[in-house]
Amino acid sequence: MTQLRTTIFSLVIAGLAAGSSAEDLYAIRDGGKLSYLNMALGEETLIGHTSVQRASSLDMGPDGMLYMHSRPNSAISPARLYQVDPGNASATLISDLGYGFELEGGLTIRDDGMAYLVGGRSNGSSFESAIFLVDLSTGVSTEIGILDILDINGLTLRSDGMLVAWNQYMPGPFTIDPDTMETEILSEEVGNIFSFRPIGGMESADQEVALIIASHFVTEGNSPPAMAFSLDMYSGELKFLSEFEGDLLITGIASVDSPCPADLNMDGTINFFDVSEFLSAFAAMDLASDFNKDGTLNFFDIAAFLTVFSEGCP
């Protein structure tokens, strides 16, 4: 271990590095399991269990932590907001949200730490989608609008401030103006690909192109696999990326990228202490040190860590 530490410090100083994939995702299942999705290989790697039942939408916060909400379980528990450690899947309750969310909904986080959260709820005679602005540090939410659209389960933010959403009942992705609640179909030509299939979530790291998962779904004797696509959020162009084997039925996805991935102790700077955190995780075979996100720990993770360490924090 001493030799490994010496080697890594030498490489840090020398600046030797190798890149990692920017297209990988975190995914949450309804039962609370958190995993990595390798988009290039179409593979899922389990990280751990959040112990949160009815887990729903997921997104990466500016602090490098994941945030998700859970749907209520009748009178047993209300909808709740959680912070999730992406390294070990441990979940910390932030607050009870105090409203419906019978359906999956969507979550997308702004750079200032505020989040848009949408969830389907019953208004007595039918379902509607309510949009909230949520302070992630306190869990305090403010309702900002109502949409007469059923079961939105994909939501992300575009670079011009518009929200982009989808559900399996719409003819295609659509935009939402968060100020006026006006909606507009982005593209109708791609809707039949997702027709009546659960959408596992939408995520966009650059706010230009979104990644979308169409979940595995069994219906009328058919069992189409889960598939990943990229969506140009301005032109509406959809491109196939990969196909996943097995029963990949997820309710939310989030980018693996964080604002400063080498800041492992999350103190806002990168230094010796972050190297020490990496070495401890690597020695313990903790997937928090799987920096190239291939599900195994080896030299390539060390090289990928050195890359982001040398880039510093923004």
Image (spheres, grey):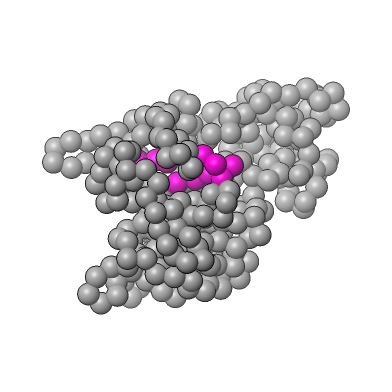
Residue 55 sits above or below residue 228 on the image: below
Residue 273 sits above or below residue 125 on the image: above
Any part of residue 28 in sight: no
Q: Which residues are magenta?
A: 201-214
Viewer-proximal residue among 262 and 111: 111
| Residue occupying image coordinates x 13% and y 41% | 220
| Residue occupying image coordinates x 37% and y 50% | 185
| Residue occupying image coordinates x 68% and y 45% | 259
Locate residue 70, reporting x and y percent: 42, 62
The reply, left or right, for residue 261 in relation to residue 135 is right
State yes or no: residue 206 in magenta. yes
Any part of residue 203 in sight: yes
Which quadrant of the structure image shows residue 56? bottom left
Viewer-proximal residue among 157 and 45: 157
For the stretch drawn in magenta, the main secondary structure is strand
Residue 133 sits above or below residue 278 on the image: below
Q: Report the quarter where the N terminus lies.
A: top right
Which quadrant of the structure image shows residue 300? top right
Locate residue 105, reporting x and y percent: 39, 59
Count of numbered labels shown in the rendering: 0
Locate residue 143, reporting x and y percent: 48, 73
The reply, left or right, for residue 94 in relation to residue 35 is right
State yes or no: residue 207 in magenta. yes
| Residue occupying image coordinates x 59% and y 42% | 206
Which quadrant of the structure image shows residue 237? top left
Q: Report the quarter where the C terminus lies.
A: top right
